[in-house]
Image (cartoon, rainbow, N blue to C red):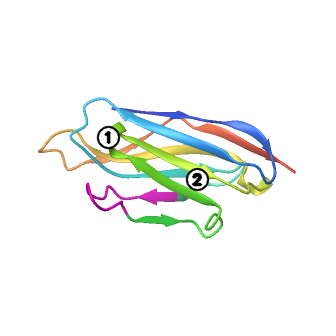
Amino acid sequence: VQLQAFGRGVVQAGRSVRLSCAACGSIFRLNAMGWYRQPPGKQRELVARIDAGTMLVAGSTNYADSVKGRFTISRDNAKNTVYLQMNSLKPEDTAVHYCNAYISTSLYHYGMDYWGKGTQVTVSS
């Protein structure tokens, strides 16, 4: 199983960036997916998380207080992909962003966390 993240960049404050992350490989069940970030000199922190949901109901979401109202997480279960739309970016959003997913690889595998390689987002003032 691999998580492949796309989207990075250097943007000015107030602009937007969209990150995407696709899970591929031997996936039996794709459970919660999320984005974490690690600002320079700080520990990794949760940005946003989204549950799997159902065919009719989107998964529930939760966000870090610092990004509520600015960031939106969504997912396309048919594509095993999670997105993070980041609007009104601030310099303090500068960080390496990591995709995360809790994946079961078989019926008998309860599941485990998988991580994508980090992608840098830099916001200049």
What's under tag 2, amino acid-wise? Arg
Tag 1 residue: 78
Answer left or right for 14 relative to 86.
Answer: right
Residue under the image location 57 percent in, 66 percent down: 64
Q: Which mark is residue 115?
A: none
Which residue sits furthest bottom? 65
Q: Residues within 10 Å of mark 2 (few under 14, many from 20)?
A: some
- Secondary structure that dominates the magenta span: loop
Residue 22 locus on image (x, y percent) = 42, 36
Q: Pick whichever, 31 or 41, lies toward us.
A: 31
Residue under the image location 87 percent in, 51 percent down: 125
The image quarter containing residue 19 is top right
Q: Pick whichever, 117 or 90, lies toward us.
A: 90
Marks 2 and 1 sit apart, C-alpha to C-alpha, by 29 Å
Q: Nearer the viewer, mark 2 or mark 1?
A: 1
**Mark 2 and mark 1 residues within 8 Å of each other at the beta carbon:** no
Q: Is residue 65 magenta?
A: no
Residue 115 locus on image (x, y percent) = 44, 41
Provide the secondary structure element on which disc 1 rests.
Answer: helix
User: Taking 14 as reference, is 98 above or below it?
Assistant: above
Residue under the image location 36 percent in, 60 percent down: 59
Q: Which residues are magenta?
A: 48-59
Q: Which mark is residue 44?
A: 2
Answer left or right for 109 relative to 34.
Answer: left
User: Taking 86 as reference, is 19 above or below it?
Assistant: above
Q: Is residue 57 magenta?
A: yes
Provide the secondary structure element on which disc 2 rests.
Answer: loop
